[in-house]
Image (tube, rainbow, N blue to C red):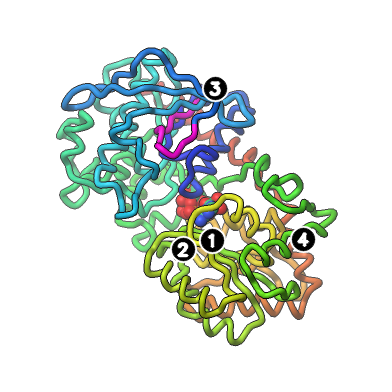
Amino acid sequence: VKILTVTPEIAPFIKVGGLADVVGALPKALNQLGHDVRVLCPLYGSINRGHDWACFDMPFCVPMGPGAHWARIWETLLPNSNVRCYFLEFDEYFARNEVYEGPWGDHYDNDRRFAFLSRAAIELCEYLNWIPDLIHCHDWATAFVPVLLNTVYQNTPLSRVASVLTIHNLDHQGYCDRSVLHYVGLPDSVMTPDNCESMGAVSMLKGGIYHATKVTTVSESYAREIQTPEGGSGLHNVLKFRAADLVGIINGIDTHVWTPKTDILLPAHYSLENLSGKSLCKQSLIQEFGLEETPARPIIGIVSRLYSQKGLDLLQHILPRILTSMEVNFVVLGSGDKQLEGAFTYYAERYRGRFGLHLGFSESLAHSIYAGADFFLMPSRFEPCGLGQLYAMTYGTLPIVRSTGGLIDTVEQYREGLGWGTGFRFDYPTCDALYFAIGWACSTYYDRPHDMQKLIKNGMRKDFSWLHAAKRYEQVFKWAVDERLRL
Ligand code: ADP
Ligand code: GLC
């Protein structure tokens, strides 16, 4: 199958969250299964172009509602693969360093920026003279692709191109003013409730869900949750309407990058057979975060965007209670909500040596935490899949997670005394539930070291590679292509 993947972010070039990791790895796995996969992403100001980048000579014309936009296309390969990656250069929209938001919040023109990306993706096929069988879109930022294919491109050769929309996070929908329709060249007829309209405005994601040939999301539990009023962020009825075409596929991880055996960002390496390097990683983490030199005390690591989805405000409320009643230290890497950043900064001062904090984004510190911590905390309110817990288990670090979405599907509950499971799960997003889950993990560390060792090994033995998921995507893509050709 010929597949064009369109994405607002892709690792290792530009990353905000797990979407980038997924798009940086899935095309490689599909490529290994024999598919011709290519990727399109915007060329942001913060992307460094290496020696192996080439720019197409011919300018790239994208017809938009009010007139044409002239852009340029760059090409390089996704590292460790033959997957071609195209980058869309259009400085008015993408020269800024950040993907979605700057220091003052979301970019004011996000709707136009990503509507433009969606239209450019379709035009790119003609420009390259390479018509894919399918376009794989990710999240609201590319959700106009299926809408455009079914309307503006209806009577063109591109109308035979199938579309698959993968939902990574239903909370972000590209909710915007209807003027975006005229801007991208969509007809007014899409402005109905069973199309792109939502509460008098436009929901780009809703339109994508209606129009995509197939819809996927990143775990089976999340696929079920988003069809309920509690988990559907207002779109549960649309998702129920598309239920027959909605498939949950759990994410994998890029095992080239994420393995404690060879990870170049770690001070020492280790494996299931020989875990001794993990204590060196812990020692180095203690120094990196300026913690007290107490290697016998467990460390709980957090690597996260600091937003309400991730439930870390619960930790904020109970941190003093934890630190005064349990022998445990924390290291936190993340950024986001200013109130939470402020609270954590206060704690880092107040509990110096026990609560280590780094505000910001750092790939190398993230790896240090996955390897050097004993536990990894994700008390998410909702979690479509979650990659942090997968990295943690791969690095022999036990996840403490709330039972939601992909966390249910990937973390097996610990059975005390038997040493079964791969981590600690709790049900309710409350301070008490979190406090007791952390207490349970700590008591296991001190009182049941034998179980700890078993859990670590159970997690490290799991195969989270992309191969299984890529085969499921392959199946969905085949269904989508066949269905489109039958139309
Ligand atoms: P989400 O995509 O919702 O943020 P995931 O768990 O799927 O959650 O993926 C998060 C990804 O982003 C992981 O690769 C994680 O290591 C990375 N990450 C999150 N915050 C940071 C940070 N501050 N620095 C480095 N990496 C981060
Ligand atoms: C989103 C979700 C996260 C998921 C990631 C990759 O950002 O919040 O749960 O793992 O996408 O699919």
Q: Element type at marker 3?
A: strand
Q: Name the quadrant containing residue 81.
A: top right
Given residues 408 and 32, the one toward you in this image is 32
Q: CA distance from mark 2 to mark 3?
A: 36 Å
What's the distance in space between the residues labelled 4 and 1, CA to CA? 20 Å
3 and 1 marks in contact (CB < 8 Å): no
Q: CA distance from mark 1 to mark 2?
A: 13 Å
Which disc number belongs to residue 280? 4
Quadrant housing residue 408: bottom right
Q: Identify the residue shown where x is 44% and y is 15%.
A: 130
**Reading the chain from its start, which is encountered first: label 4 or label 2?**
4
* Residue 186 located left or right of residue 447: left
As helix, strand or loop, the secondary structure at mark 4 comes to: helix
Give the percent coordinates (x, y) of residue 389: 60, 58
Lower sequence index among marks 3 and 1 = 3
Above or below, 364 relative to 23 = below
Q: Residue at 59% across / 27% down in the picture?
A: 31
Residue 314: x percent and y percent?
Answer: 46, 74
According to the picture, the residue beneath numbered tag 2 turns out to be 310
Can residue 287 be seen here? yes
Highlighted range, magenta? 38-48
Q: Amino acid at mark 1?
A: Leu
- Which residue does the numbered mark 1 point to in the structure image? 333
* Ligand 1 neighbours mark 2 (CB distance < 8 Å): yes
State the separation of the CA atoms marked 4 and 2. Answer: 29 Å
Q: Amino acid at mark 3?
A: Asp
Which residue is label 3 attached to? 36
Q: Which three-letter amino acid code belongs to the residue tagged 4? A: Leu
* Type of amino acid under label 2: Lys
Classify mark 1 as within 8 Å of ligand 1 or not, answering yes or no.
yes
What x and y, as percent, mark residue 187? 17, 30
Q: Marks 3 and 1, how far apart in space?
A: 37 Å
